[in-house]
Image: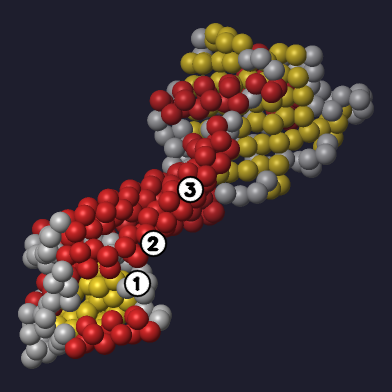
Amino acid sequence: MKKMMLFDTWNLERLGSLFSYMGEQGWHLTEVKGGQAIFEKGNVTKTRYRIDTFPINDLKGQNKLDANEQLGWQYIDSIGSIHIFREKEYVEAKEIYTDGSEHARSLKIIQRSHLLKTLGATFLLALSSWLYLNILKNNFTVVLLYDSVIVTLISIFVLGYFLLKMYIGVFYLANLRKKLEDGYQTRIGRITKMKLYQMKVRKALLFLLAAAMTIMGLLELSNSNPYIMFQDDELKIVMLGEILEGENYENVRNGKWRELSFREDGSFFVPNQISVRQSVEIGKDPVYNPTIWAKRYEVGFESIAKLLVLIMVQEKQHLGTFERKTNPSIDELWTIEEENFTSFIARVGKNVFIVDYWGIETVDTLIQYSIKN
């Protein structure tokens, strides 16, 4: 029977305490992988552990291993230049370091390595965050419409948390070296049940967060459909045919998008998203080819719907300048009216309607057919 536990590799004093405490509970360290310690169930024993730091891939490192063995410490495993030793059975092992200055010098290699890793992680996280946020700056609606963006932003915050822990490690190691040079002896204190509980809670929260992010990503994949051919008179979105038939056009034929191009999506903030694209040709007027791109968003909260309208008005400025209009049946209405092009963004409660129309119909006509319950 085995058990895994997360830990911070730089917290050298706590590592010895943690491994000793687990031995008292009948769990004995067998190996370490990155930031995970793997324990195997055995007899309850009061066993001491010590952490040493030195390069192991040369003769000097091998000699250090042998020297620690002679002092009564059995080598268990390593994480880079960090090596874990357990007191041999039936032997009262001697301390690896009795001189604080010598111990401080041994920590120089891990301090330098940890600092370089922290600076590298800082650069990469800062660069990736800057690039990603600049992409979102001019297209912020994706945060509301796509869960994958939320997952990415959460990932950045989680990585920021780990980076903060790395900086704590930088200051911890620098402070530990200074104290050792001043005569301080490392203390392998006792891990309390509360501290162990906190470590378990942290591991559980990280697991739940990873699971939630995975589920959100899978839900987006399952909810997102490409534009498909679809035809349904009861859809909660305007059809081009409705407008043209209502305006008494005759001999209407399908244009470059055959019949109806229809798409449904969903996200945490905007659970129901419908999008329609369609164009037609008028038999008596071959030059006139009306085209519509309509979207309907059923938002979870009215405050989010208001935010979505505000962002859309800003992000669609490339189509023209939106003007705020009033309509007794619409909470918010923004319109663009130009020759052969009309666009509007409307909010009714928690529902947001967006229509871009290339044709001669007026905005009032489009609103008449577009706003549906």
10 Å crowding of disc 3: few (<14), some (14-19), many (20+): few
Which residue is pictured at 12% across the width and 67% down the height? Answer: 188
- Residue 277 as seen in the image, left or right of residue 187: right
Which residue is pictured at 83% across the width and 39% down the height? Answer: 256
- Residue 9 as seen in the image, left or right of residue 324: left
- Looking at marks 3 and 2 on the same chain, the residue that comes earlier in the sequence is marked by 2
Mark 1 and mark 3 in contact? Answer it, CB < 8 Å. no
The residues tagged by marks 2 and 1 sit, at their Cα atoms, a distance apart of 9 Å
The image position of residue 176, as x and y in percent, is 21, 57
Label at residue 113: 2
The secondary structure type at the circle numbered 2 is: helix
Mark 3 and mark 2 in contact? Answer it, CB < 8 Å. no
Give the answer, above or below, for where 116 lies relative to 50: above
- Residue 94 as seen in the image, left or right of residue 254: left
The residues tagged by marks 3 and 2 sit, at their Cα atoms, a distance apart of 16 Å
Label at residue 123: 3
- Looking at marks 2 and 1 on the same chain, the residue that comes earlier in the sequence is marked by 1
In the rendered image, which quarter contains the N terminus?
bottom left
10 Å crowding of disc 2: few (<14), some (14-19), many (20+): few
Mark 2 and mark 1 in contact? Answer it, CB < 8 Å. yes
Nearest the viewer among 197 and 324 is 197
Which residue is pictured at 40% across the width and 25% down the height? Answer: 303
Give the answer, above or below, for where 363 lies relative to 5: above
10 Å crowding of disc 1: few (<14), some (14-19), many (20+): some
Q: Is residue 122 visible?
A: yes
- Looking at marks 1 and 3 on the same chain, the residue that comes earlier in the sequence is marked by 1
Residue that label 1 marks: 81
The secondary structure type at the circle numbered 3 is: helix
The secondary structure type at the circle numbered 1 is: loop
The image position of residue 152, as x and y in percent, is 47, 47
Give the foreground label among 1 and 3.
1
> Residue 276 is drawn in which quadrant?
top right
